[in-house]
Amino acid sequence: MSWLTEFVRPKIRNLFARREVPENLWHQCPACQQMIFHRDLALNLKVCPHCGHHMRGSATERLTWTFDEGSYIRIELPKVPADPLRFRDSKRYSDRLKEARDKTHLDDALVVAHGKLGGHQAVVAAMEFEFMGGSMGAAVGEGIVAAARLAVLQEAPLIVFTASGGARMQEGAISLMQMPRTVIATRLVKEAGLPFIVVLTDPTTGGVTASFAMLGDIQIAEPGALIGFAGARVIEQTVREKLPEGFQRAEYLHEHGILDMVVKRTELKDTLARLIGLLRVKELPAAA
Ligand SMILES: [Zn+2]
């Protein structure tokens, strides 16, 4: 620590901090820089009313936005061994987990719930990007398996909202083993003849893209979502070519046949309800 970092830097920071808008009332859109009332932003499901930019939603917000009247029942997910490798980088993995739990009030980066969606029974699993970048370790893998089992038990479709940086490096090979595990989970749902729908949200990358996130019967993404396996810079360096404009964005992937549709968040719930209705023809006689 020098005089420069200890004394001068905080002074400079204060100089700028004063100009910031109070966080509790307004939110600045990172895309168009316009100011939005927090309440308006919440009413618009965290989509900028000026430019349509989709801001990230938390796992629990996803559930509220998706289920009828925002009401659902969360299930408890299987407990997994904490820090199996006793991993440590600049911090202990166990400390990182504790921090993430305090920050998000979740046990890990996945939440699973069931309830009604457009009047149909549905199981929804939502990933939490704020929990260690939505990384997939044993807890997320077990959670996806639990969600698939619940869908089969309830004869309900499974909908997964993805948001992940990929595998959780602190769990090493155990994290990688979740890729085949979650793939098997999707098979359980499909073999039971139930719809499996994936909604890719910003960002979905790495081992999650390389496993269950790309196996939906229907692949949906939110506008502008970053979806890919490796980062654009890594690919550019490997292929030594400039990548096209909008590469790895939802719209580009849709144009190139990787996705079935790009749906605005405000239309997502109705789209999901319609799809379930179309795919679950079996339900119709009972409903009539
Ligand atoms: Zn905006």
Image (tube, grey):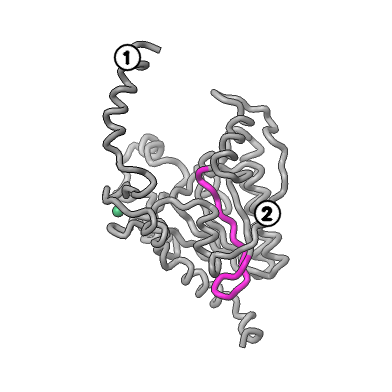
Task: Say if mark 1 contacts mark 2, CB within 8 Å.
Answer: no
96 or 152, which lies in front?
96
Residue lying farthest to the bottom in this orientation: 288
Q: Is mark 2 within 8 Å of ligand 1?
A: no
Tell me: residue 146, above or below residue 217.
above
The residue pinned by badge 1 equals 4
Q: Secondary structure at mark 2?
A: helix
* Crowd tier of the residue under label 1, counting other residues whose Cα lies within 10 Å: few below 14, some 14–19, many 20 or above: few
Residue lying farthest to the top in this orientation: 2
Nearer the observer: mark 1 or 2; the answer is 1
Amino acid type at image mark 1: Leu
Asked if residue 217 can be seen in this view, the reply is no
Residue at 40%, 39% in the rendered image: 235
122 or 256, which lies in front?
122
Asked if residue 118 can be seen in this view, the reply is yes
Q: Is mark 1 within 8 Å of ligand 1?
A: no
Tell me: residue 86, above or below residue 49.
above
Q: Residue 159's spot in the image, x, y percent? A: 57, 62
Tell me: residue 120, above or below residue 253.
below
Residue at 59%, 57% in the rendered image: 125
Q: Which mark is residue 145?
A: 2
Residue at 58%, 65% in the rendered image: 71
Q: Counting residues from the N terminus, which is met first, the one under dot 1 or under dot 2?
A: 1
Check the picture and name the quadrant holding the C terminus. bottom right
* Crowd tier of the residue under label 2, counting other residues whose Cα lies within 10 Å: few below 14, some 14–19, many 20 or above: many
Main secondary structure of the magenta stretch: strand
Amino acid type at image mark 2: Val
Magenta stretch: give its range. Answer: 115-130
